[in-house]
Image: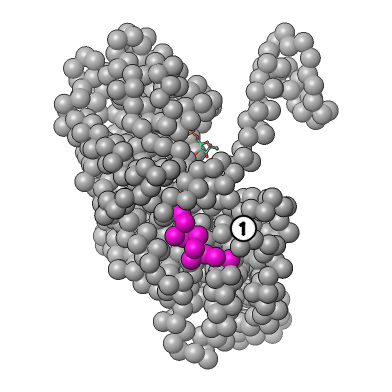
Amino acid sequence: MTGTVNKLRAWKRLERHAKKMKKIEMRDMFEQDNKRASKFSLQLESMLVDFSKNRVNEKTLVYLLELARVRGVEEKIQAMFSGEKINFTENRAVLHTALRNRDNTPVYVDSKNVMPQINEVLAKMRKFSEAVRFGKFIGYTGKKLTDIVNIGIGGSDLGPVMATEALKKYKAKDINTYFISNIDGTACAEVLNKLNPETTLFIVASKTFTTIETLTNAKTCRKWLVDALGEHAVAKHFVALSTNAAKVKEFGIDTENMFEFWDFVGGRYSMWSAIGLSIAIAVGMDNFEKMLEGAHTMDLHFRHTDLAHNIPVMLALIGIWNNNFLGLRSQAIVPYDQYLRLLPAYLQQLEMESNGKFVSADNEFVKYDTGNVIFGGAGTDVQHSFFQMLHQGTTPIPVDFIIPAISHNEIGDHHEILIANVLAQAEALMKGKTVKETAEELAKAGKDKEAVDALKKYKSFPGNNPSNTIICKKIDPYTLGMLVAMYEHKVFVQGVIWNINSFDQFGVELGKKMALDILPELQENASSINHDSSTAALIRYIKNLRK
Ligand code: F6P
């Protein structure tokens, strides 16, 4: 089904409904219905997703589910899993789910079952990661490889760096992981300064193997290694993760040392593929496979559960409601778990690169908002930074709170304090504190009328700020897999409803190309500088400073 999404009856009905809902306070809905929490939450195994602190009622859900149905969400879910080429601008299947298809049921792309090749690479990853971990694949001078450097950017960095941090407790004691992504020479220098070439393994991770940042960083690292150990050492200290064997070879890495994946795996959906090699070396292949199993559990839930009980679908619909109908375009992600501190950055790419699109599947410019602005950080740190704006800013900012019931580090009462904080934040954002309540509180605390009047507005809280609370038992590899897959599918459903392609990323091209034009102009002897007056002046100014 196509058509302009915001012209659909289901959309129009939601717009009318939103006018009424905007006047309703969540705190009143909670007071009127003591079953609200159970009505508006879903559970999968030990993961609970409570979306009751949103400005929704039963009707809202009925209308949102109707929108999902008329947009063909059920059919699109099946189309993705069955290998249809739903990435229509690039004519590609979208099969990150096949990478973690632990049932090994056949999945076909162009009539070919892709499972055998996926299993082959997983077996190669197991063999190699174990050989490195147990000192069988060793460096050129015979030393154990203990320092693993992943060189990649975007999807070839954010998944591995986030997951190795999230699973730090599972990491082998004698393995250190490092990540070089930024083209800024400092990124390379700071990592290389810490390392001994004899014990260092470089993993060059790039789907295309054409990304300038990654290739430049890899060349610098290669030179550093060759300067220390000679050209022959490269085969023992460099491996590549890519879909592009020709480019890997051209770079000087033997394709024997290449771990393959395929163009049906998008960059930001690739940590389940060979791109996860650094994760597998750090935490072991058994744990890597547990992560795949967790994701698979979420996949099965997503694929086979009706829309109303489907966690990723409901999260997607709540997000659409907040964005398109309540006008709340930001989304904060706040994990209350130190090990998940990089999850917001990971989800920022996942959501914003997937759904930051302005052309519909009908080849028309969309006339409604798409992707959300994603930001976040670890609780409680961010309570002391941007939370002021969540509590007293002029526009509500929906939040996803994520917390494990059990910490990997149960020290004293730290975790109880952490839990108390996350629950209090969600409750405070929902309830707020009216000016009247604030005045009463101030008076009770002994303030005179003048002081009460002077402060009562400043110290009040509008409340009614939406949030979801996601509770897991513990952040283990399986749970991490579930969590990340949940967000992947949420993003997918939103893309279906917005009628956009969540799987291309042409938006990153223009700036990249223009950087290549500017590069020669930065040279001392550049013949001309052809830009708008601002860019041209900035180039001249910087050149002058660099003299
Ligand atoms: O930023 C654009 C992008 O293509 C991302 O989608 C991707 O994750 C990243 O660059 C890295 O690409 P590659 O893995 O091909 O080096």
Which of these two is toward me, 536 or 44? Answer: 44
Residue 343 appears left or right of 124: right
What x and y, as percent, mark residue 195? 33, 23
Residue 532 appears left or right of 547: right
Residue 386 visible in rendering: no
Q: Residue furthest right?
A: 533
Classify the position of the C terminus by image quarter.
top right
What x and y, as percent, mark residue 231? 33, 9
Which of these two is toward me, 413 or 302? Answer: 302
Q: Amino acid at mark 1?
A: Asn
Task: List the residue tagged with mark 1.
Answer: 499
The residue depicted at 52 percent of the width and 28 percent of the height is: 211
Q: How is the image coloured?
A: one colour
Q: Secondary structure at mark 1?
A: loop
How many marks overall?
A: 1
The residue depicted at 34 percent of the width and 55 percent of the height is: 295
Q: Which residues are magenta?
A: 71-80
Residue 208 appears left or right of 305: right
